[in-house]
Amino acid sequence: MAANAFQNHKETKMHWEQGAIYDLSWSSDGGLLTAAGAKGPVRSWRLERGGHKEGEELKELGSDIERLAWCPALQHTHTLAAASYEKSVSLWDQRCTSVFAKLATSGLNSDVCWSPSGKYFAVVNREEGLEIFDMASPQSPVVVAELDQVVCSIRWDTSESLLFMTTINGTVEVYAWPSMEHLTVISAHTASCNIIGIDPRSKLLATGGADATMGIWSTDDFSIVRTIDDYESPLLLVHFSSDGRFIASASDDLAIRIHDSFSGKLAHQLAVSSMTTALEWNPRNLMLAYGSAGSVKTSTKSTVTILLKS
């Protein structure tokens, strides 16, 4: 039953001294977790029997990484994209533990996303710009677009035929890929639509808004399935589990909520000591990683934590 799915799970905190968490990402095989923070280099942990809490630092990536994304395609599970605040994205090869390419972008990077096949990589910036790179020849983008509004997040659907962009105007703009034909607009929230999550089963979308609600949408006709209003502040993060059964979410509230994606009911809730700034389900198991900002006011350290079955 959904209500009991996490009764045997426990929280494991990883070694972390790099300040407030900016982002984290799982490798596509589920064996490697990587996080970026405000201080110091990116750190990775390999999940082997017995656990490795110390991890390793990827110093070659530098200390100004804000967005991370492991390639979701299994044949490229060794490739990590690391976007700095400035105008570049480094591509890291875990096999040789080095940067093998650097993509020049036109603005201050705000979100990054791989297509499911790993063939394409998208970057949106704070100046209303979009760039998409073909990884067969990533020296220059194959799509460059000046958008007429600020984009908060960008994701492909699982079939790689649709591209979704959420905006500060509360909408989800839906484009056909690769034609980039604008198909429709989903009026998702009454304030900024901060984030979108894609159901691995291709049945649902989840959006999080500054109006403190989560919307769950059908991918058949983009109609609303249900609205969840359990939050007291803007919703910042949503992510579907690998089997599509659960949606993890976080707002400014000191809680991470896990809802059943079918019923919308709250399946589990985690109390946290400071704001959650990143979360992502493991792509292979019912295992959730999340990172926090920490708090100077309450002397709370930022942490990287994994919720996993004991």
Image (tube, rainbow, N blue to C red):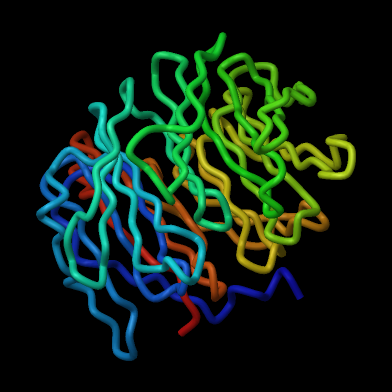
* Res. 273 in view: no
On screen, residue 188 versus residue 290, left or right, reads right
The answer to whether residue 222 is visible is yes
Find the residue positioned furthest to the top: 148
Picture quadrant of residue 172: top right
Instruction: Give the vertical position of 68 relative to 281 (above or below).
Output: above
Horizontal and vertical percent for residue 244?
A: 70, 62
Rendered-image quadrant of the N terminus: bottom right
Q: Nearer the viewer, residue 162 or 233?
A: 162
Q: Residue at x 31, y 23 (%)?
A: 108
303, above or below 207, in the image? below
Residue closer to the observer: 120 or 56: 120
**Residue at image x 37%, y 43%?**
138
Question: How many discs mark residues in the rendered view?
Answer: 0
Given residues 173 and 180, the one toward you in this image is 180
Question: Picture coordinates of residue 275 (x, y %)?
Answer: 38, 41
Residue drawn 73% across and 70% down?
A: 2
Q: Is residue 24 above or below residue 112?
A: below
Horizontal side of 103 relative to 73 (left or right) equals left
Residue 307 lies, in percent from the top left, at 45, 69
Give the image quarter of residue 7: bottom right
Up/down of 259 relative to 52, above or below: above
Residue farthest bottom in this picture: 49
In the image, taking residue 180 as reference, residue 301 lies left or right, namely: left
On the image, the x and y values in percent for residue 298 come to 23, 40
